[in-house]
Image (tube, rainbow, N blue to C red):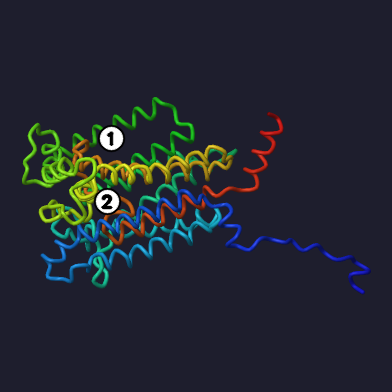
């Protein structure tokens, strides 16, 4: 009777969450990440055995830990990839604030683990590197501020983001962690550039970074030692760079064979910072090219999908996340082939490390969420075809 008098209200019919997610997600990028993690486990079977032997542990102790952390990182990635852009923004802001507090606590309660830099917090037998989680959160906050600055009567988001940049870089330099500092500055520059920053300002920031690098060289023995080793025309074959360079040369095109590599017994960081040297020695150039291709698929496909996006926040945040993911991989591999000075930076999803793989899962999960196809994008394509 009520329906006869007032009429029935239409009920919106929505697709189930999982089918809609599967239809809109960038499946090529997501598959590339799973393949990268699989390659990381494969290389871990070889690279982490010497470390376990030196520490008196089971041969595949570190591989099992990496599988556990990797499962957590991939689960976080899949969960975040289903989030809306608004939820990604909220989680990114909260994550940034939490990670910044932990970074500020490092000078008081942090540990160096014999690496010469106070970058880790010990939590119940596990080590946490807060700077890994700071990067995606910083990109989200920066994109949010710069997108808000484009609105009418919006806040001075660019100026506020620059203030946050100086605070973050200042605390990272205290560790010291100049590699992560450079990556944070790069991420801010990418977001600012996409937001329409003038080239004069970008050049000025580059000059400030160069001046900061010179100051770090004169003030930090740790930083100066790495730069001197990079600039030296001769590479000491007993250093990590020397071992890595020799392993890459020995690997050639097809590698020396599975399990036949020797660099993993000499390099203390063969399972983390120099994992690409193990890949090049045992599997050759073919596997290295595959790894490069997989990273390229994630970055290039994400940027292409973002080009059609009209929402400023999505476009800015997605570009920043894609670029820091790709550039971190470039830095790691560039150090191994001596194109860059040693940075102590992992290869996302491939290197061993709980903080690294979980933070990479957060980064790519947010990126997949922001690059999901939306009805607005489909309509734009449809109208474009009709006009054509």
Q: Nearer the viewer, residue 284 or 328?
A: 284
- Report the residue at 49% width, 46% height from top: 144
How many marks the image carries: the answer is 2
Q: Which residue is mark 2?
A: 346
Residue furthest to the top = 200
The picture places residue 349, in percent across and down from the top left corner, at 33, 54
Left or right side of 163 for 65: left
Left or right side of 12 for 34: left
- Report the residue at 22% width, 61% height from top: 110
**Residue 138 against residue 211 in the figure, above or below:** below
Q: Quadrant of the C terminus?
A: top right
The picture places residue 50, in percent across and down from the top left corner, at 14, 61
Local packing at callout 2 (Cα closer than 10 Å; few below 14, some 14-19, many 20+) is many
Left or right side of 176 for 146: right
Q: Nearer the viewer, residue 114 or 286?
A: 286
Whether residues under marks 1 and 2 lie with C-beta atoms below 8 angstroms apart, the answer is no
- Report the residue at 57% width, 38% height from top: 308
Q: Which mark is residue 209?
A: 1
């Amino acid at each position: 009777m009520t329906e006869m008098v007032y009429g029935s209200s239409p009920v919106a019919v929505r697709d189930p969450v999982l089918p809609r997610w599967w239809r809109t997600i960038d499946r090529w990028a997501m598959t590339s990440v799973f393949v990268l993690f699989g390659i990381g486990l494969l290389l871990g079977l070889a690279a982490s055995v010497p470390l376990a032997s030196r520490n008196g542990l089971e041969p595949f102790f570190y591989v099992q830990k990496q599988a556990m952390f990797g499962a957590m990182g991939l689960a976080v990635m899949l969960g975040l990839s289903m989030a809306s852009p608004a939820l990604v923004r909220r989680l990114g802001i909260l994550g940034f604030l939490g990670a910044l507090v932990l970074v500020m606590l490092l000078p008081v309660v942090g540990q160096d683990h014999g690496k010469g830099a106070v970058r880790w917090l010990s939590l119940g037998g596990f080590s946490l590197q807060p700077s890994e989680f700071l990067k995606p959160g910083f990109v989200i906050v920066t994109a949010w501020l710069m997108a808000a600055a484009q609105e009418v009567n919006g806040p001075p988001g660019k100026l506020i983001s620059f203030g946050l940049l100086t605070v973050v870089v200042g605390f990272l330099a205290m560790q010291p962690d100049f590699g992560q500092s450079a990556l944070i500055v790069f991420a801010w520059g990418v977001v600012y550039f996409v937001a329409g920053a003038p080239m004069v300002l970008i050049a000025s920031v580059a000059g400030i970074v160069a001046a900061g690098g010179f100051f770090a060289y004169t003030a930090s023995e740790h930083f100066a030692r790495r730069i001197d080793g990079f600039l030296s025309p001769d590479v000491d074959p007993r250093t990590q760079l020397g071992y890595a360079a020799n392993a890459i040369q020995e690997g050639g095109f097809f590698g020396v064979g599975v399990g036949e590599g020797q660099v993993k017994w000499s390099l203390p960081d063969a399972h983390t910072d120099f994992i690409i040297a193990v890949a090049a020695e045992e599997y050759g150039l073919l596997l290295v090219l595959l790894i490069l291709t997989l990273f390229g698929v994630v970055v290039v496909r994400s940027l292409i999908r973002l080009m059609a996006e009209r929402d400023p926040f999505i476009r800015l945040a997605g570009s920043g996340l894609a670029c820091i993911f790709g550039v971190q991989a470039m830095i790691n591999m560039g150090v191994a082939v001596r194109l860059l000075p040693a940075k102590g930076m992992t290869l996302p999803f491939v290197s061993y490390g709980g903080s690294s793989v979980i933070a990479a899962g957060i980064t790519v999960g947010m990126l997949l969420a922001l690059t999901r196809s939306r009805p607005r994008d489909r309509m734009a394509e449809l109208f474009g075809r009709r006009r054509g």
